Amino acid sequence: LRLARALAGRPAGQRVALTTAAAKHGRRFAAAAAYPKSDDPDLTYGGGAPLFKGVGSMHWSSKPIFRRQGQEFPVYRLMDQKGKLLDGATMPFSVEQGLKMYELMVRSSVYDGFFLTMQRQGRISFYLTNWGEEAASVGSAAALSDEDKIWPQYRELGMFLWRGLTVQEMVDQNIGNEADRNKGRNLQVHYSLLEKNVECVSACLSTQIPQAPGAGYAYKIDGADRVSVAYFGDGAASEGDALTALNFASVYGSQTLFICRNNGFAISTGVEDQFSGDGIAARGPAFGVPSVRVDGNDLLAVYAATKEARRLAVNERTPVLLELMTYRIGDHTTSDDSKSYRSTDEVQEWKTKGPIPRFRAYLESVGAWDEQKQKALEAQAKEEVISAFKEGERKKRGPLRDLFTDVFAEMPWHLEEQWQHMEKHVREFPQDYNISKYRDLDGTPPAMDASRALSRPRRVPPAPAGATKRITMVAAINEALSIALETDDRSVIFGEDVAFGGVFRCSVGLRDKFGEHRVMNAPLAEQAIAAFAVGLSCAGYTAIAEMQFADYIFPAFDQIVNE
Ligand SMILES: Cc1ncc(C[n+]2csc(CCOP(=O)(O)OP(=O)(O)O)c2C)c(N)n1
């Protein structure tokens, strides 16, 4: 695509020269296309591409030039603070669609207030609100297709509601009862909605960001009208994972949207202590990722920018970065008191500038909303959440065994034993564990499966059947990889230096046999290689990730152990 775009409109002779240079020097050409042609033979190669690989420089300079800043990012907005459309702006959606989004923004806000109270009453142990960021969450989700895969952080309740998380599911998750999809194992607000293409919230910050490009790459090679979407905060953007994610997505042309909610804080750390560059958007162009900064409290702008970013991602097979400027009105979580690091006046001011009053003003100006409707919606949302909560409190907590299942297909002996110890211990001290709340915790402890106990002989792998041959380990791995790629056309292998055969020669010949989209070099970042594999797998591919040296696997520790 880049080649086609760059060639369009160029004279035929030049086209041949550029094509030859491109064929010889691959990615180097892409950078050249963006810069004016240089006549200096010292600076060019093959008549068009820059001499130095991977950069677009086409001029010498007799002075050292230190660049501090790229171009300014204007903040994209369509509606002013009072809910009035800016001159020349048009509505990106109908009033009916706007009402649907507004309803979810209000519901999100009402639910937040309710769960905060439940936490204060000790009926759930933790909560965090989404106040002030409702437009960033609902507006972006509404602009996506239901097929797009979302990798959330944790402050995107509006997105979950848009995708169909019910109030009962919210309640069951926050209580952690047996109806919770994740069997009560996760911290509060760590929702998941797999069948609606939303992956589970992960407590380890940023791990989802490099996973998203794996799925975005799968959609690219499928030629699908689908994108992968990572949400994250301005704090999470500082993790190395965020930077490797941008780089991987760009190198692979992965159709991925990176949606950063820049709400000014990471717990108590203000953005001034988080970074000193120009926000998050400015990082995109450094990785070749088209980027935009948006007024995140303007529902219209968030929706329109996300829609356009999605179009770009699918049509041009590229990642896109959106920085949604907003403000975290609530405390970080119920474990935080933000009065100790910011003024209540500041919070008060942002409340009046929040996305809900702003879009409400618009709806009122077109006669689609009024105080009576507002009161009715708030009352209905409250009633629904109260009744769901009562229902949720009546449900039991899941059996203790659930703490140990779902990691291994068959529970290994050491987990079986830990489970037994726990059952015994909890029954010994029933007054401390409120055991009547749990399923199957009364009565005698369930019998242990003796076949899984420590004393049981360990299983040994079966002896090979059929004809055997003696080959080196490397040849065996190469053959196994070849069989995997041959028999499963949705399998992909990637890693450092894999394309030319790998430094241990395990992937020799595979690229010629299976093509550049299935046998790929990876940029040098082990955590992103592992994360890319997670993303590809979640999109239905068999990911074969090569770690070049066992000694250097540690950057991928978080992905392998936590994810
Ligand atoms: C790897 C990791 N480090 C630290 C934490 C603890 N922690 C949880 S949330 C948070 C702040 C995140 O801020 P930001 O990404 O800006 O999102 P926001 O809370 O503002 O929505 C921190 C430090 C964590 N969960 N994971």
Image (tube, rainbow, N blue to C red):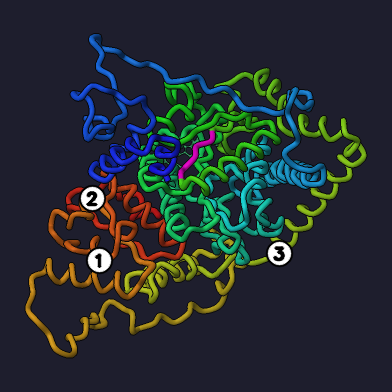
Kindly identify the residue that appears in the image at 60 percent across and 60 percent down. Answer: 196
Residue lying at the far top of the rendered structure: 63
Kindly identify the residue that appears in the image at 56 percent across and 61 percent down. Answer: 194
- Residue type at the position of mark 3: Arg
Label 3 belongs to which residue? 394
Seen in the picture, residue 324 relative to 529 is either above or below; the reply is above
Please rate how many residues cluster around mark 1, counting C-alpha atoms within 10 Å: few if below 14, some from 14 to 19, many from 20.
Answer: few
- Residue type at the position of mark 2: Glu
As helix, strand or loop, the secondary structure at mark 3 comes to helix
Closer to the N terminus: mark 2 or mark 1? 2
In which image quadrant can residue 538 be found?
bottom left
- Estimate the spatial distance between the alpha carbons at disc 2 and disc 3, rounded to whole Å: 53 Å
Closer to the N terminus: mark 1 or mark 3? 3
Residue 483 is situated, as x and y percent measured from the top left of the image, at 25, 74
Seen in the picture, residue 400 relative to 532 is either above or below; the reply is below
User: Which numbered mark, 2 or 1, is in the foreground of this view?
Assistant: 1
- Estimate the spatial distance between the alpha carbons at disc 2 and disc 1, rounded to whole Å: 19 Å
Res 513 label: 1
Res 496 label: 2
Kindly identify the residue that appears in the image at 59 percent across and 29 percent down. Answer: 325
Seen in the picture, residue 344 relative to 543 is either above or below; the reply is above
Residue 428 is situated, as x and y percent measured from the top left of the image, at 48, 67
Q: Is residue 491 left or right of residue 61?
A: right
- Estimate the spatial distance between the alpha carbons at disc 1 and disc 3, rounded to whole Å: 59 Å
As helix, strand or loop, the secondary structure at mark 1 comes to helix
In which image quadrant can residue 435 be found?
bottom right
